[in-house]
Image (cartoon, grey):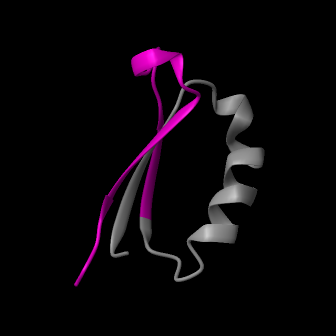
Amino acid sequence: MVKTVCFLADMGDFSAFNAVYAKYFTGKPARSCVAVKTLPKNVLCEIELIAEL
């Protein structure tokens, strides 16, 4: 991964999200994290990523 953009429905979930994120994105790509009012299908988070092949 080169970069991720993380969208959270509630920034109160950031700490829990960050713990799970750190488990799977061990290469520590550049990251932006923003709060949004709602996400499709009322999910709690969405991650957009750019990967290098």
Q: Residue at x 44, y 61 (%)?
A: 31
Q: Residue at x 54, y 25 (%)?
A: 43
Instruction: Give residue 38's position: percent from left, percent from top.
Output: 46, 15
Vertical arrangement, residue 40 with respect to residue 20, above or below: above
For this view, does 50 lie left or right of residue 34? left
For this view, does 26 lie left or right of residue 34? right
Instruction: Give residue 12's position: percent from left, percent from top.
Output: 73, 30
Q: Between residues 51 and 34, which one lies in front from this camera angle?
A: 51
Q: Residue at x 22, y 84 (%)?
A: 53
Vertical arrangement, residue 14 with respect to residue 40, above or below: below
Instruction: Give residue 52's position: percent from left, percent from top.
Output: 24, 81
Find out whether residue 12 is within the magenta segment.
no
Vertical arrangement, residue 46 with respect to residue 20, above or below: above
Write the start and end of the magenta stretch as one range. Answer: 31-53
Q: Quadrant of the N terminus?
A: bottom left
Vertical arrangement, residue 2 with respect to residue 11, above or below: below
Instruction: Give residue 24's position: percent from left, percent from top.
Output: 61, 69
